Amino acid sequence: MVIKQEQFALDLDDDLLSIEKAQGARSPEPDTLENYAAGFPSHGIGRSRLVHADAFRWLAALPRHSLHAIVTDPPYGVKEYEADQLEKREAGVGGIWRIPPSFDGAKRAPLPRFTALNERERDHLSRYFVEWAEVVSRHALRPGGHVLIASNAFLSQLVFAALVEGGLEYRGEIIRLVQTLRGGDRPKGSEKEFPDVCSLPRGNYEPWGVFRAPLPAGMKVSECLLTFGTGGLRRKVDGSQFGDVIVSERTPRAERAIADHPSLKPQSLMRQLVYAALPLGEGVVADPFMGSGSTIAACEAVGYRGVGVERSADYYALARGAVPRLAAVKVRAPRELQLPLDGQDADS
Ligand SMILES: C[S@@+](CC[C@H](N)C(=O)[O-])C[C@H]1O[C@@H](n2cnc3c(N)ncnc32)[C@H](O)[C@@H]1O
């Protein structure tokens, strides 16, 4: 199989992040992914397809082994994207969404508070991801296909264990270095009494789980690449290794202005992850929880075919408008990104 490197033009100044479709080098294929709608309402954008469906039902409805990779940011607490929780978020009262404390007078957007999950909810979360991994690993994903899945420092141990129980093979983690709003606070209600204490380390990373659908017994990675086009991860455009630490940034304002979704991920990150997900640069990358479609925009930007699925009608409509615009965004190079590790708030 030939790696279609000619699809990309490298801006040497900008390293991997400026992978962009070569102007006129290869005109976008017409959307070839109509079948991936699996009977649900859908919409084609470039070479990708957006589907309005429930992720579980969609994955089960796909023909077996349809997907080469999954890159996704699921509802971590499962319930934060339920209609009642979104209503509470809108009203600013109760529920899992809380306004983070303001250190500088700036108004912050609500964030889901995962420590609020009780034992029953943690159990529900675990079963949710076991079931999800089962339909992914036994049905929708090809043998050797990778799953790159966003998590957070509180829940990753629970979610990752559930994914293994559901049949996926754990292959490590990618650490996205980014300052989050998690932790760092003095003990609640006793801030003056314990000024030198923080109850939790201040969050400076986001873990992404790396999983793989098991290879058939005895099959080597090279055979899997030949047979299924999967099994490994793609090296960077310059041939260097894809590493498991990515210096990142909070989602830039310009991207948030395009897609007003509470969990929008930056294109500078998503393009690197998506690019790595297809070892031969061929196949289909899916995001079953696409939100506003940042994964699919990244697919479009690097010249891959993507399928994004969203259950909420509002976010599905948002993605339809946002994907082409996010795909056109120019991103910053890794060396331009700074990691604020000094306890100050990053410009979100
Ligand atoms: C964490 S957000 C992903 C946001 C995305 N990273 C972005 O950049 O916009 C998860 C999304 O999954 C959607 N969702 C939750 N449960 C779903 C399900 N069962 N099927 C499909 N989508 C679902 C939610 O509505 C939400 O938009």
Image: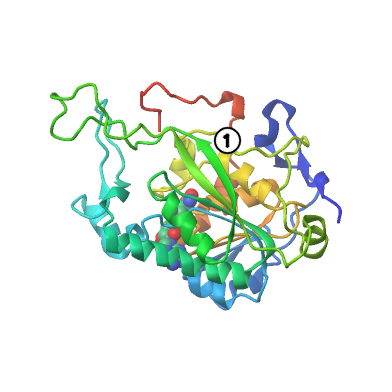
- The answer to whether 316 is drawn above or below residue 328 in the figure is below
Q: How is the image coloured?
A: rainbow
Which amino acid is tagged 1?
Ile
Regarding mark 1 in the picture, which secondary structure is present there?
strand
Q: Is residue 322 above or below residue 40?
A: above
In the image, residue 225 above or below residue 13: below
Q: Position of residue 114 (x, y in %)?
A: 32, 50
In this picture, residue 200 sits left or right of residue 281: left
Q: Is residue 291 visible?
A: no
Q: Residue furthest right?
A: 2
| Coordinates of residue 20 in the picture (x, y in percent) | 70, 41
Image point (44%, 24%), residue name: 340
Is residue 145 or residue 89 the one in the foreground? 145
Q: Quadrant of residue 122?
A: bottom left
| Relative image position of residue 183 (x, y in whole percent) | 32, 35
The reply, left or right, for residue 235 in relation to residue 213 is: right
